[in-house]
Amino acid sequence: MKLFFQTKYDADKDGHFGDFGGRYMPEVLVPALEELTRAYEEIKRDKVFERELFKLYKDYLGRPTPLYLAENLTRHLGGAKIYLKNEGLLHTGAHKMNNSIAQALLAKKMGKRRLIAETGAGQHGLAVATVAAKFGFACTIYMGAKDVARQQPNVFFMKQLGAEVVAVEEGTKTLKDAVNMAIKDWLADPDDSYFLLGSTVGPHPYPSLVRDFQSIIGLEVKEQLTKRPDYLVACVGGGSNAIGLFNAFLDDQAVKMIGVEAGGQGVAKIGQHASRLTGRGRLGVVEGFKSYFLQDKEGNIQPTASISAGLDYAGIGPEHGSLYESKRVQYTQATDQEALRAYQLLAQKEGILAALESAHAVAAVIKLAPKLAKSKTIVVNISGRGDKDLFITADKLDRKNWRRYLKNQAENNG
């Protein structure tokens, strides 16, 4: 299995995926980005690095993750066979570890002493805090105050791992603002610090680098399936879990791909969704790269909303923008209510509690599978497990008992 490979949809040497991507950063950060680009190009040719990374994938993360035929869900929907690529069984519970441990290994080889990261749903922050503890880095995680409130389990775990978690009170208090604060921190200390970006966004080389480290997902699917899949489905926030599944199949035109954005309360409602491609996204340059962003006519970033903290980013990764324009990947959206129903159906039919992000992908599969012949095959990326979403799902699905429990705990321990 070869981790580093090119497809016809890859970026050019300057990090442009057609009209998307690039590097738009303050001059003070250009040397750090050039240093990272050189290190990235070197490790792509470094067989020792690749062997060490694959050993960590196997022994520390628990790869390969299972590709599981969801027989009960398939029977219930009455159409195509549905396979679940269960990244939720990975160490720390999500695909985020694939990229985090690889970038931490790269940072170590570059001689860095501190990791900086941004996080929305908390899974990337948890992954970075984990690898920081393993490799002995100091670690600072920036997280929007709104996300801190709704992702308390991950915040607690990050702190137990020794990370400093900074709640960002600026702006919308979500992922966009956490990214801004992380970049400001990096600007202040580019020599000793490594900005461990968690998705296929940001300035070159991050979109390509993160994609490469997540491509293990699709490469495993290729080995695990006895025949080529007909459809690949994954949720899309910044886009790392989706491109991780898609990348190994991009050059095979027979494989159809669907990326699922957060429809929130409906894409017709400004500020109530996070659908950049199926909503009202506009081309713009934000946080170091060019892509589609939810913005007004003046270019100001609009508020977003999603039941899933990991899908409410106002922009989408540049490679996804290019794949959308070329029509290689179809993009759709699922609403909050559709994601909740998918979360429950998967739990009740397969005994799997998926992350709310992943539930958006399952929601799309629920619509797609019955329309296809039983001979067809769908692979859906279950990018994370749902225990991190307890404070959201319990309040939405069992509000009365959940709030009574919280009240009793506060009264008994206050």
Image (cartoon, helix red, strand yellow):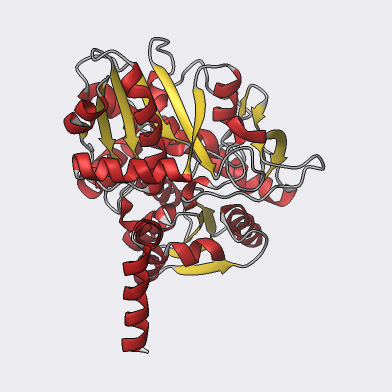
Task: Left or right? Give the position of 21 relative to 6.
Answer: right
Residue 162 is situated, as x and y percent measured from the top left of the image, at 38, 70
Placement of 86 over or under 117, stated as above or below: above
Task: Left or right? Give the position of 80 relative to 336.
Answer: left
Q: Residue 204 falls in which quadrant of the image?
A: top right
Front residue of 297/253: it is 297
Residue lying farthest to the right in this orientation: 298
Residue 184 is situated, as x and y percent measured from the top left of the image, at 65, 59
Residue 61 is situated, as x and y percent measured from the top left of the image, at 26, 47
Front residue of 348/136: it is 348
What residue is rendered at 64% in x and 55% in y?
180
Task: Left or right? Give the position of 67 relative to 330.
Answer: left
**Quarter of the image where the N terminus is located:** top left
Residue lying farthest to the left in this orientation: 71
The reply to whether residue 133 is in sight is yes
**Quarter of the image where the C terminus is located:** bottom left
Placement of 387 over or under 252, stated as above or below: below
Residue lying farthest to the top in this orientation: 254
What residue is rendered at 38% in x and 10% in y?
254
Placement of 75 over or under 285, stated as above or below: above
Q: Residue 370 falls in which quadrant of the image?
A: top left
What residue is rendered at 35% in x and 48% in y?
355
